[in-house]
């Protein structure tokens, strides 16, 4: 009679269901003991099972049990760390975070921090709306100095309020060599704890991690 031992669940699953895992482990261990007892009871007396097989099976299950306990402990530690981060980031609500995610435009100019490629001889600001469609393209100096987007179209009419993405496109000899998001300031409206990680919600709905914030300032 062949006995199979339960395999270890991945850490991510354990992190989300520590209590459920413990219950499953207990149930599996009872099932394992029942199977082991039945194996001993119904073994062939002429060919008894080697005691070393019992020892190997028990050792294997013990390793699985210890791994599950370790994963549960790591999960608990991660939740505690996440709660600490939540307390810290909650104090950021109402401040403006510097990130490279889409930014909400409410009619006021938006300050941008470009980072063009060093080899670029031309740089352009590419503005896209919430659907990803390009709505404006403006030339910029080949510099990392902050610039301001006024939120006004080429014909002088203001853009509607909404979320916009700002990409810095670097060219050299007419070829695009780099295109990456510019950093902008967005108002933090909410802090959440999700899967042990502190998340920030910006005005307009953009979701970022606290680790992705490269700067903070009071609202201007």
Image (cartoon, rainbow, N blue to C red):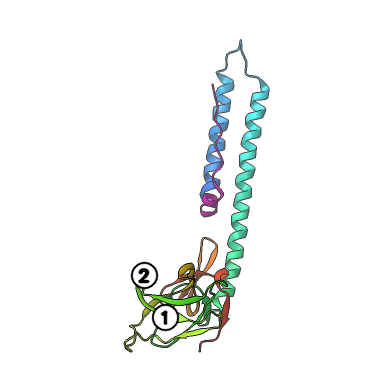
Q: Which residue is mark 2?
A: 132
Q: Is residue 18 magenta?
A: yes
User: Is residue 93 in view from this perspective?
Assistant: no
Q: Quick one: 110 or 125, which is closer to the camera?
A: 125
Which region of the structure is painted magenta? 1-19
Classed neighbour count for the residue bearing mark 1: other residues with Cα under 10 Å, few (<14), some (14–19), many (≥20): few
Classed neighbour count for the residue bearing mark 2: other residues with Cα under 10 Å, few (<14), some (14–19), many (≥20): few
Q: Which residue is mark 1?
A: 138
Residue 71 drawn at (x, y percent): 60, 50
Residue 126 drawn at (x, y percent): 42, 75
> Quick check: 85 left or right of 187?
right
- Whether residue 64 is situated above or below residue 205 in the rendered picture: above
Instruction: Give the numbered dot on residue 129.
Output: none
Numbered label tally: 2
Residue 120 drawn at (x, y percent): 53, 73
Element type at marker 2?
Answer: loop
């Amino acid at each position: 009679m062949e006995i199979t031992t339960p395999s270890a669940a991945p850490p991510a699953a354990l992190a989300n269901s520590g209590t459920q895992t413990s219950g499953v482990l207990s149930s599996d261990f009872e099932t394992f003991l029942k199977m082991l007892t039945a194996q001993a009871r119904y073994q062939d007396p002429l060919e008894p099972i080697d005691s070393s097989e019992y020892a190997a099976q028990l050792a294997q299950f013990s390793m699985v049990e210890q791994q599950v306990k370790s994963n549960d402990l790591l999960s608990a530690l991660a939740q505690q760390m996440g709660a600490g981060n939540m307390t810290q980031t909650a104090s950021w609500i109402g401040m403006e975070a510097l990130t490279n995610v889409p930014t909400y435009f409410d009619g006021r100019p938006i300050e941008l921090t470009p980072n063009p490629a060093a080899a670029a001889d031309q740089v352009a600001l590419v503005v896209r709306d919430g659907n990803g469609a390009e709505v404006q393209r403006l030339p910029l100096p080949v510099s990392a100095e902050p610039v301001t987007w006024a939120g006004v179209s080429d014909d002088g009419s203001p853009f509607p309020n909404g979320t916009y993405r700002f990409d810095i496109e670097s060219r050299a000899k007419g070829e695009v060599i780099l295109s990456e998001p510019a950093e902008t300031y967005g108002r933090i409206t909410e802090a959440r704890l999700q899967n042990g990680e502190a998340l920030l919600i910006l005005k307009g709905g953009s979701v970022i991690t606290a680790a992705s914030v490269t700067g903070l300032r009071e609202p201007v």
